[in-house]
Amino acid sequence: MAPMLLDSPAGLLEVRPIEPSASLRLRQRVLRPHQSIEEMGLMGSDRPGAIVVGAVLRASGEVVGTAAVAPEEPPPELAAHVAARPAWRLRSMATAPELQGGGVGSAVLRLALDKVRQAGGALLWCNARLPARGFYERAGFSAFGSAWEEEAIGPHIVMWRLTSETRGDGHER
């Protein structure tokens, strides 16, 4: 499968699978600036079956958007609410701050969702930061349960969507 191309203010991007280690600098910069890269570890991208996707600047090879998906059961309360299986978890979703709002994150999430769907996943869930809730809702995710505070990171909420979910007009959400 050829990489998806996206024109951005920073230049032409390829949205494609990447090595987990290629995303660590961006993840640290955007998600966990209080931790060193060594302290962060691979943040779930080393799980069996994990797939890491990224938006990579063609000119420099710099990763400016990333997400990781891997098979993982959702929290028990969500599992009881949504029977769809197999379940996959989305983690480490990050876009370079200077490119946020320009479609990079949406393109990365679209490819991650495609990879989950191709692997037979029926449910995709994540622990979303509250400021990103609108982004996930626009991508077809629903919030579940109550928000909580993640120490040193901020407020989060569980969000989920079916991988085959469509809008009323037949197009994917």
Image (spheres, grey):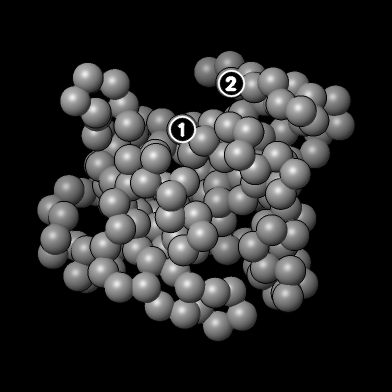
Q: Amino acid at mark 2?
A: Met
Q: Report x, y in % for residue 160.
A: 31, 52
The answer to whether marks 1 and 2 mark residues whose Cβ atoms lie closer than 8 Å is yes
What's the mark number on residue 4? 2
What's the mark number on residue 137? none
Image quarter for residue 66? top right
Q: Report x, y in % for residue 14.
A: 67, 25
Q: Is residue 17 visible?
A: no
Image quarter for residue 148? bottom left
Please name the residue shown 85% across and 25% down the image.
59
Question: Which residue is disc 1 drawn over?
Answer: 110
The numbered mark, 1 or 2, whose residue comes first in the sequence reads 2
Please name the residue shown 17% across and 48% down the image.
84
Q: Report x, y in % for residue 143.
A: 30, 58
Q: Of helix, strand and loop, which one carries label 1?
A: helix
Q: Amino acid at mark 1?
A: Arg
- Above or below: residue 106 compared with residue 38: above
Number of labels in the image equals 2
Tag 2: Cα neighbours inside 10 Å, few (<14), some, or many (≥20)? few
Tag 1: Cα neighbours inside 10 Å, few (<14), some, or many (≥20)? some
